[in-house]
Amino acid sequence: MTEILRWQHRRAPGEPVSAETRDSYYGLPVIHGPHWRWSIVFYFVLGGLAGGSAVLAAAARLVGGHWARPIVRAGRYLAFLAVLPGPLLLIIDLGRPERFHHMLRVVKLRSPMSLGVWGLIGFTATAFLNALQQAAEDGWLGQRNPAAHFLRRLPARILAAASTLPAFFLAGYTGVLLGATAVPLWARNALRLGPLFLCSALSSAAAMLALLVGRGPGNARARHALERVEQVALLGELVLLEAVQRGSGPVVGRPLSNGLEGWAYAGTRLSAGVALGLHIVTKMLPRRLRPPLRLVASLVALGDAFLLRAAMMFGGRRSAEDPAATFAITRRPEDPARQAR
């Protein structure tokens, strides 16, 4: 009822435009915000973890030697297990889950959502094949099984190279998807969200893989390689987080500095900095004190990945409800000469 009254009290012809009217839309949102819920946050987190794990596993298989085998093995399994809940989370979030198959009828190259669905399908197929080959190499499918023998004979390097593109796509496309919308916070940072989500995906994947292979015998070199990747990705994430904050401006960037979304975004920056700092401090400590700090750094990096996606998703939804934020990205800057008249 309040919204109806606000709509009825519109400016009369000839009435001067007040500051309140100029900076709002009669108290109503200008655009429809996303309806996404927590299921999409978890989809973003697991998708980034799956894509990042597949990227690291493929890179380890292509350029690493025998020392990188633990990364390949853990990365293949983790990529497949992390992507499995993805389609289910997407279907749950749909208003009409039984219509999910409608998205598979066509491929729209200009639609990030359509490309995302098909990219998810392509990644799932390559991740399944990689995990199946790894299971055959580990003997889980039996030694005399013809299917296992066929899988072991597949060229692993070609398979790794073929999975690289879908892996990079899944790791960063969720950020590109957000930037392709009309939501002010996401649209203002359209060129930053893809690299930001990619850095976060690589840091969280490296952290999880370090937890999985860190205590294995003879895995020290693999663990050090993962830690270096995690540090570089965290550094890139910190730079991009600052760029998003500055590039959003005071109006569009309100959700990043106020409310629960602002606390989550501040927690993202803090956790990324803490994880990076712990890795740096670890190198200065005696060897016996390093494992606990490495464990904490990896856990903080995983929490950072969750906070980032929650802050950006709910912050975007809040910015869509702010008419001033929509006007800030759609209106032309006023001419100073006209203002002086």
Image (cartoon, rainbow, N blue to C red):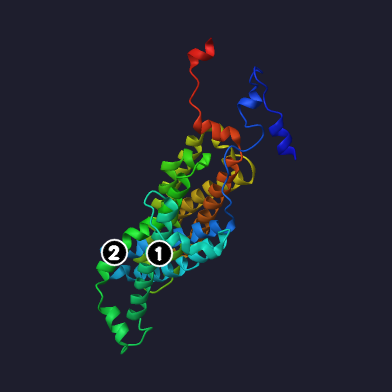
Query: Measured from the top left, where is residue 156 in percent x and y?
Result: 27, 71
Residue type at the position of mark 1 = Ile
Q: Secondary structure at mark 1?
A: helix
Q: Are marks 1 and 2 in contact (CB under 8 Å)?
A: no
Q: Which mark is residue 48?
A: none
The residue at the point 41 percent across, 71 percent down is 77
Mark 1: few, some, or many residues within 10 Å (few <14, many ≥20)?
some
Q: Quadrant of the N terminus?
A: top right
Name the residue that disc number 2 marks.
Answer: 162
Query: Measured from the top left, where is residue 307 in percent x and y?
Result: 55, 52
Q: Which mark is residue 121?
A: 1
- What count of labels does the image hold? 2
Query: Measured from the top left, where is residue 76 in percent x and y?
Result: 38, 69
Residue farthest to the bottom, as pictured: 144
Residue 67 vs residue 340, the one in the foreground: 340
Horizontal relation, residue 304 to residue 214: left or right: right
In the image, which is nearer the foreground, mark 1 or mark 2? 1
The residue at the point 49 percent across, 24 percent down is 333
Residue type at the position of mark 2 = Ala
